[in-house]
Image: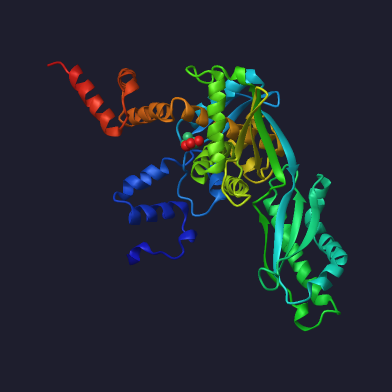
Amino acid sequence: MQEKKISGFSKLSKSEKLRWVATHFAEDADAAEQELKCFWHEDEEQQRVFDGFSENTISNYFLPYGIAPNFLINGRLYAVPMVIEESSVVAAASSAAKFWHPRGGFKAEVLSTQKLGQVHFSWPGDIRQLRQRFPQLEQRLRTDAKHITRNMEQRGGGVQDIELIDLSNVEPDYYQLRVRFETCDSMGANFINSVLEEFGNSLKAFVAEQEAFSGKARELEIIMAILSNYTPDCVVRASVSCAVDALQGACPDMPAEEFAQKFAKAIRIAEIDPYRATTHNKGIFNGVDAVVLATGNDFRAIEACGHTHASQGGQYRSLSHCKIEDGVFTFWMDLPMAVGTVGGLTKLHPIARRSLDILGRPSANELMAVIAATGLAQNFAAVRSLITTGIQQGHMKMHLMNILNHLNAKPKEVKEAVAHFKDKVVSFTAVREFLKQYRKQLVPK
Ligand code: MEV
């Protein structure tokens, strides 16, 4: 037990770290070391870039990088890069993109782009006194942070607006500065957090300098200064729409009208039932996260934001909505998110950079449109399967291929297995047994 504890792990070289982990946490240390090492990039310069993203790295973790082609979004055709480990997701996005292409494709509109941050503070003074001085305080905050905001202002962004929020009715002496930002094509996390920390210092100093404040009222305590990942005013709306009749072909065995009604009912269920809503929204994030990852953006931030949005109104609900009015089917989603196409990993990660090139070097707004359209496409494809063939049909095919790969099946065996399992349940044991029997029957007696 004791020998598995270490101090100074971060100071070891990468090879030493790897050796230590393999020696203490693997049954076969040499095999573990070799396996983890074989995923090191052969180009040392590239490897140094990857190692620079995080700490204590001992290897790289590979995920598939796929493309969903034929995405018509706002009249422009995209091949959408997706990073995801789950089978069927890229196929589903591609199939939805193909379906909507001749029906006008996806429309996506960025409704607003403001991000939020907060300085949380405790203050025993009289908030009316601070409110009276707020114009001077705001001026002071802006002036003190000028060295951070100047560049962003030159790009057309910066601090939009600062509000003093009184929450002392729910927590004694608790107040906030709530700050709105425009960060143009960058996600803006570093910029926002730097400004907020500077605001915190200035606020504390401002209060300490007020001669009219006496005693404890000159002592303001900054609790924390940090952006909010909930960005309800940085939001994109993605939609698809067509005449109900034009849905013919969504499912070969179902008339368009029946498909539209059943689809709308499925969306309604996700609006009213949180259990279904969670799975439904997970399907949306299958698409969203895959593009977010491929473009070097922060999928945790975008997930957190989306789930908060889905809970507005006190109950977790579907992010997407559907209506059928005057014979027209419309399916849409508003998704708040903060993404960037400059700065952060978008420049440093070679594949993220490549993804942005494949997307035509989009602005942050255009990337929001692509991400939301992919999420909506994913949702359309999932719900279409659920209300028609069921989800397992597609999944099982991929599952079968994965198992066959794992069992080193030859092309002829794959063909036979696909035919055999067409109408049977796929399981690891069943596929292994099938291959065993198949191979046995080929052995000459
Ligand atoms: C699986 O990753 C995603 C789905 O469960 C989404 C859904 O149920 O809508 C298929």
Q: In which quarter of the image is the C terminus?
A: top left
- Horizontal arrangement in the rendering, residue 64 relative to residue 396 (left or right): right
- Rendered position, 387 above or below 346: above
- Horizontal arrangement in the rendering, residue 297 relative to residue 194 (left or right): left
Residue 50, percent across and down? Answer: 54, 45
Residue 363 visible here: no
Residue visible at 53% across and 23% down?
259
- Horizontal arrangement in the rendering, residue 12 relative to residue 45 (left or right): left
Q: Residue furthest front?
A: 326
Residue 27 visible here: yes
Residue visible at 37% across and 47% down?
33
Residue visible at 45% across and 32% down?
87
Residue visible at 44% across and 25% down?
389
Q: Residue furthest bottom?
A: 215
Residue 160, percent across and down? Answer: 81, 52
Q: Front-most of 254 and 29?
A: 254
Q: In which quarter of the image is the N terminus?
A: bottom left
Residue 289, percent across and down? Answer: 56, 40
- Rendered position, 162 above or below 361: below
- Horizontal arrangement in the rendering, residue 14 relative to residue 349 (left or right): left
Q: Front-most of 411 and 219?
A: 219
Instruction: Place residue 117 in its image quadrant.
Output: bottom right
